Image (spheres, grey):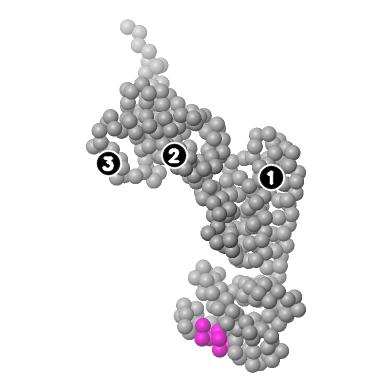
Amino acid sequence: YLIDFVGIKENYDKTTDDYLKELNRFNQSDFNTQDNLKDMFADRNILEKDIKNAYDDLFNYPIDDIEDMTSSIVNISVMNELLKVSHAINTLKERYNLIRTSNDLKILSLKEKIDIEKISKISSMLNKKAKHLHALKNINEPKNPNDLIILEDLIALLNFKIEFKESKELRFKEKEEISAKYKQAKEMLEKSPDKQDKEIQKISKELSKLIQEPLTNHNFDGISHSYSVIISQLKQHKDQTTHLLNKYDNDLSYAITHKRLHDRLMEENISKGIFTLLSTLKKALDARISKRQEILNEETTLKTAIKAELRDAFNKNPSLKDLQKEKEFIAQTLFNELTQNHHQGNSHA
């Protein structure tokens, strides 16, 4: 008898490979153990029906081709559709052992199209797309028109752009150029020490609109130039922030309080007065903090100290009387920044 050892070995290798991938996925993923235990005692026909329903939900998606499936996921614009696809893929993920062992013809045809590696890749892409749609919703449909843009949402949009390249009609050089600008803008936003800064918020709003512009050969030059302008604005803002930080010995709390007060008063000629007041306040509070660091963890004591030193600073500098009307704002802002930066580990320089 002639035995096809080659065929046996190929099947054995494939089965072993599938098993190892399954085992690795089980160990590394956020696999729901309770669901799996429940499946062990569930009716096989019900589980197979779940698989077939999931397969039907994925009927219009090219699940056998990762590149085409990536394009399809990138183009999903409605959260309900994304949830439907995600639920179907998760069902296949959870029931994969049954897919491997089933003799049902429909499930066998599914098995030919998809394996655990593809399922895991598709699942990962769906998670990224969910973050992308969630970030878009936060930016385009704020609960309050005056809500600040959350930079993490903007960074999520940039991350998505970086990972899932622009339209295929762009040349390689253009894709690389625009991708480099995404990365540069993202890095600068991530390093911005003051996420609520008025200028950063203004730039972020411009950037969020630009990110959502479809990029084609026809508008590439204009959009690329717009990114260059935004990057230039971010650089200029960084230089201004660095200059202000240097004036306050790299103490972010005072630099931010300075900017907030300056924006509130919106008069260039009082900038010098702001620095005189805050530097006097900083010197006095630094002395207190150096003697007793615990003050930064004591709300009442810190607020009392700020108000006392603020009063003293106004008494010593009569020329700062125009700023006295803002003493409550200054005290609250400085308190917020001192405690926040202390808890984040960027405290007192």
What residue is shown at x 63% (from left), y 62% (from top)?
201
Question: What's the distance in space between the residues labelled 2 and 3, CA to CA?
Answer: 24 Å
Question: What's the distance in space between the residues labelled 3 and 1, CA to CA?
Answer: 48 Å
Q: Which mark is residue 84?
A: 2
Residue 273 in magenta? no
The residue indicated by pointer 1 is 178
Q: Secondary structure at mark 2?
A: helix
Up the image or down, 175 lies above or below 4; here it is below
Residue 1 drawn at (x, y percent): 32, 6
The residue indicated by pointer 3 is 37
Residue 287: in sight, yes or no?
no
Q: Secondary structure at mark 1?
A: helix
347 lies left or right of 212: left
Q: Which mark is residue 342?
A: none
Residue 86 drawn at (x, y percent): 44, 40
Instruction: Tell which circle, 1 or 2, labels the residue nearer the N-terminal end.
Output: 2
Q: Which residues are magenta?
A: 303-309
Inspect the image, locate mark 3, and give the three-letter code of the amino acid beneath it: Leu
Nearest the camera: 86 or 117?
86
